[in-house]
Image (spheres, grey):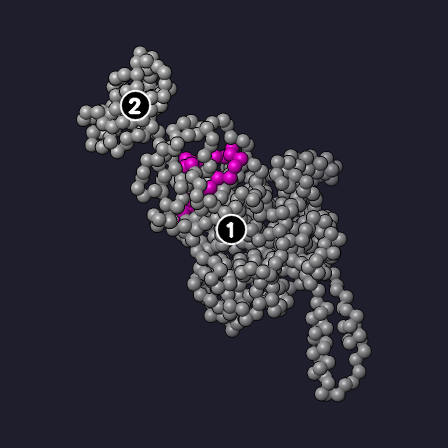
């Protein structure tokens, strides 16, 4: 069982931790003691053992790549601790010969030099591997799994190079991971005579692909996670250990060299991302997942907001070892009672009252530059938040461009898009409801500035403010060599899309322009217009509104007869003949803004 029945394999023994001097003295110098003192000695021994228990830093490492690149074989070669969800043990995974769900395993390593003086007092390093599916149809599972990682291994098949899902996984890595190592797998399948040459060529190609990303300095390690053996039965994973993997120790050293101290804090509310849930007869329901924030302890009450229930934590284990508590970044198995496992395959648990579900929210967004399609306002897309993927639509808006006044064309071309990064300061800054924002027909893929969207979901999801959201078009043909990930963002505010007052706070406008014709020039200041309003409109309600006719700017005075209107143009030095010449062929334009969430639909002109 995942997280609660984890077995050590015989591939590589984890480093042994020496007992403390006090523990050695107590255990090596045993002498008979009176019965009334034995309990005290046992208590001291237990305390001493607890003190000798090393403080372990857990680093979550995503293993991502195209299908059949050898991700699971790599996880198997690295790991000394596994779970029943690892290494494609699911019956359907064995039947189809591919990873269908997230798999978790781990191995211990010595704390690298750059972390030995850490203030947190960690003594040992544990890498927890998150083996993600590679098939295109399972990208939503990859996105959900990647949001818990600190480091990423991007696995590339040396015989095939960068493929479609390799690129999509790289995008996910840019959004979720701080460090990346490229693993060039299956080096044993390259002809030995040309292996070095082909490796160098592949590294140059990968380096070029990474050059425009934040991982341009990522190391590349070549391995053979599952060396090819003539006559080996690929269908039986138990018969692959005929030859040792190649390059694994070099990879581990690269991981140790690149690892940085993740931000870990016990402060804040508990948020626990659940990736598997199953019942155990006579015990309760087991939840396995990763603590995203805060801490968890035995006997603590936790809430399942999607189910609207609270339960008490009965026990906690970390890879078969029982613990009383766990903190941010730790992967744990948690047992609770009286919870129906069928109602919660994946989801979230949290401190009571710390999270809520939302169906509409204001999101700071940026386009993903590899997406070649158009993210149009009101068009449907898939939105992934944690382990949840739902259908949604967006209304995009941004800051007004300086040259884009009412009804005028946009100014100069926008700056190129900024590099993909999920933690830009402008993505997490508080949303300003006092500002006015310009409506966008589509997300501007070339804009350097942050843009925003009102995102409306077809089904509610549960998350915190600041949660990472990734929008994609998973309906696209998986056989096309295109990136399906369209844009990403951070949830800034949740709103009630059905509440006009709530939406009315959002000041998003469209530039509008009504047009009419000149009927006649009465004198150098007075022009009579027509066909700007319907015959039933009270023109006097538009008095003093600004109008444009060619180069002239004036105001509406009022109605003129039954269907016409009078305008005044005082700010020019032309005579009547000059006015006729200046406005020849021009239309009367009434330019204004309409705020799309204003229930009164009022026409507004800026000064």
* Membership of 452 in magenta stretch: yes
Task: From this view, report whether residue 269 is shown above or below residue 508.
Answer: below
Query: What crowding class fits label 2: few (fewer than 14 Cα within 10 Å), some (14-19), or many (20 or more)?
Result: many
135 left or right of 563 in image = right
Whether residue 266 is visible here, answered yes or no, is yes
The structure residue drawn at horizontal position 53% and vertical position 51%, both measured from the top left corner, is: 144
Residue 564 percent coordinates (x, y): 22, 24
Which residue was labeled with disc 1? Answer: 467
Q: Position of residue 20 (x, y in %)?
A: 77, 69
Residue at 45 percent of width and 61 percent of height = 305
Question: In screen coordinates, is 512 left or right of 81?
Answer: left
Residue 64 placed where, x, y %?
A: 60, 47
Query: Which residue occupies the foreground of this view, 523 or 272?
Result: 523
Residue contact at pointers 1 and 2, CB within 8 angstroms:
no
For label 1, the crowd category at 10 Å Cα-Cα, with few meaning under 14, some 14 to 19 and many 20 or more, is: some
Residue 70 is labelled as none
Give the residue pinned by disc 2. Answer: 568
Q: For numbered disc 2, what is the local secondary structure?
A: strand
Residue at (57, 50) in percent of width and height: 146
The front one of 297 and 76 is 297
- Relative image position of residue 579 (x, y in whole percent): 32, 15
Which residue is most to the top? 577
160 horizontally vs 516: left or right: right
The answer to whether one can see residue 98 in this image is: no
* Start-end of magenta stretch: 438-457
Q: Quadrant of residue 410?
A: top left
Alpha carbons under labels 1 and 2: distance apart = 54 Å
Residue at screen point 49% across, 52% down: 465
Mark 1 or mark 2: which comes first in sequence? 1
């Amino acid at each position: 069982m995942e997280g609660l029945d984890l077995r050590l394999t015989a591939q590589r023994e984890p480093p042994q931790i020496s007992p403390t001097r006090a523990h050695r003295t107590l255990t090596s110098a045993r002498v008979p003691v009176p019965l009334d003192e034995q309990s005290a000695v046992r208590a001291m021994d237990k305390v001493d053992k607890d003190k000798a228990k090393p403080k372990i830093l857990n680093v979550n490492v995503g293993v991502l790549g195209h299908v059949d690149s050898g991700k699971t074989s790599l996880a198997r070669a690295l790991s000394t601790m596994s779970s029943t969800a690892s290494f494609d043990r699911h019956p359907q995974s064995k039947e189809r010969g591919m990873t269908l769900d997230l798999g978790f395993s781990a191995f211990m390593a010595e704390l690298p030099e750059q972390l030995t003086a850490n203030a947190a007092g960690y003594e040992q390093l544990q890498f927890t591997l998150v083996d993600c599916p590679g098939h295109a149809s399972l990208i939503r599972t990859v996105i959900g799994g990647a949001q818990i990682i600190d480091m990423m291994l991007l696995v590339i098949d040396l015989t095939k190079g960068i493929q479609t899902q390799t690129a999509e996984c790289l995008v996910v890595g840019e959004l979720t991971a701080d460090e990346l190592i490229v693993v060039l797998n299956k080096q044993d399948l390259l002809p030995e005579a040309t292996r070095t040459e082909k490796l160098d060529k592949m590294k140059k190609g990968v380096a070029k692909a990474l050059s425009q990303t934040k991982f341009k300095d990522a190391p590349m390690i070549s391995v053979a996670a599952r060396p090819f053996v003539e006559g080996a039965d690929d269908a039986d994973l138990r018969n692959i250990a005929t030859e040792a993997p190649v390059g694994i120790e070099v990879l581990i050293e690269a991981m140790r060299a690149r690892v940085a101290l993740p931000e870990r804090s016990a402060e804040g509310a508990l948020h626990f991302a659940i990736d598997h849930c199953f019942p155990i007869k006579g015990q309760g329901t087991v939840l396995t997942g990763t603590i995203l924030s805060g801490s968890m302890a035995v006997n603590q009450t936790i809430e399942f907001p999607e189910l609207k229930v609270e339960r008490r934590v009965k026990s906690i284990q970390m890879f078969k070892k029982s613990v009383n508590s766990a903190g941010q970044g730790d992967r744990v198995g948690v047992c609770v009672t009286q919870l129906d496992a069928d109602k919660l395959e994946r989801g979230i648990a949290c401190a009571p009252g710390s999270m809520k579900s939302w169906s509409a929210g204001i999101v700071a967004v940026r386009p993903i530059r590899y997406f070649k399609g158009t993210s149009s306002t009101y068009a449907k897309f898939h939105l992934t938040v944690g382990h949840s993927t739902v259908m949604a639509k967006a209304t995009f808006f941004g800051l007004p461009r300086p040259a884009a006044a009412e009804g005028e064309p946009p100014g100069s071309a926008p700056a190129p898009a900024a590099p993909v990064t999920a933690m830009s300061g402008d993505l997490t800054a508080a949303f300003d409801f006092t500002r006015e924002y310009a409506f966008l027909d589509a997300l501007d893929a070339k804009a350097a500035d942050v843009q925003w969207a009102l995102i409306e979901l077809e089904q509610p999801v549960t998350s915190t403010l600041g949660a990472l959201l990734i929008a994609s078009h998973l309906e696209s043909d998986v056989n096309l060599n295109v990136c399906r990930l369209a844009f990403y963002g951070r949830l800034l505010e949740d709103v009630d899309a059905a509440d006009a007052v709530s939406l009315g706070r959002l000041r998003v406008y469209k530039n509008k322009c009504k047009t009419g014709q000149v009927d006649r020039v009465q004198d150098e200041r007075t022009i009579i217009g027509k066909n700007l309003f319907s015959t039933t409109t009270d023109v006097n309600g538009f008095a003093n509104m600004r109008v444009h006719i060619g180069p002239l700017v004036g105001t509406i005075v009022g109605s003129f007869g039954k269907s016409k209107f009078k305008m005044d143009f005082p700010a020019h030095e032309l005579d009547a003949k000059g006015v006729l010449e200046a406005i020849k062929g021009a239309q009367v334009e009434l330019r204004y803004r309409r705020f799309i969430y204003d229930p009164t639909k009022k026409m507004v002109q800026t000064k």
